[in-house]
Amino acid sequence: MEQFSDCWGSRHSTARMARDMSDKEILKMELDQLKKEVNTPRSSVSKNCADTIAFVEGLMPNDPLIKGVPDDKNPYKGDKGGCTIT
């Protein structure tokens, strides 16, 4: 890995850019990433959609954008002072 110093003199290591790598190195990097991802648990889109819908519908009763804010808790409702420009 390359090392560089920033304007404060601290040293950082940085990954090589793909444009500076050979085709073989890029393929090896892609293979390493795929090896990491192969064990990622997967589920169907339909199940994920159903879970997302259930989650959103479960929060709906307390959502102020859907239910609205009660007048007594709404700081912008009614005449609570402020200034009027004439």
Image (spheres, rainbow, N blue to C red):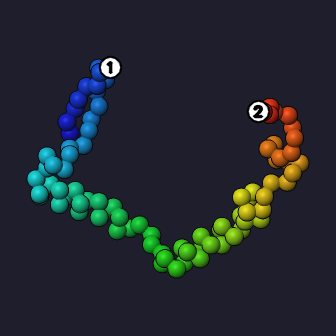
Quadrant of residue 24 within the rendered picture: bottom left
User: Badge 2: how crowded within 10 Å, few (<14), some, or many (20+)?
Assistant: few
Q: How far across and how far down the image is residue 57, in percent? A: 69, 70
Viewport quadrant of the C terminus: top right
Gap in angstroms between the C-alphas marked 2 and 1: 52 Å
Element marked by disc 1? loop
Q: Residue at x 24, y 43 (%)?
A: 15
> Is 74 or 16 nearer to us in this picture?
74
Comparing labels 2 and 1, the label whose residue is closer to the camera = 2
Specify the amino acid type for callout 2. Ile
Label 1, on which residue? 8
Q: How far across and how far down the image is residue 19, in percent? A: 15, 49
Pointers 2 and 1 in contact (CB under 8 A)?
no
Above or below 79: residue 11: above
Q: Residue at x 81, y 43 (%)?
A: 75
Q: How far across and how far down the image is residue 77, in percent? A: 83, 46
Specify the amino acid type for callout 1. Trp
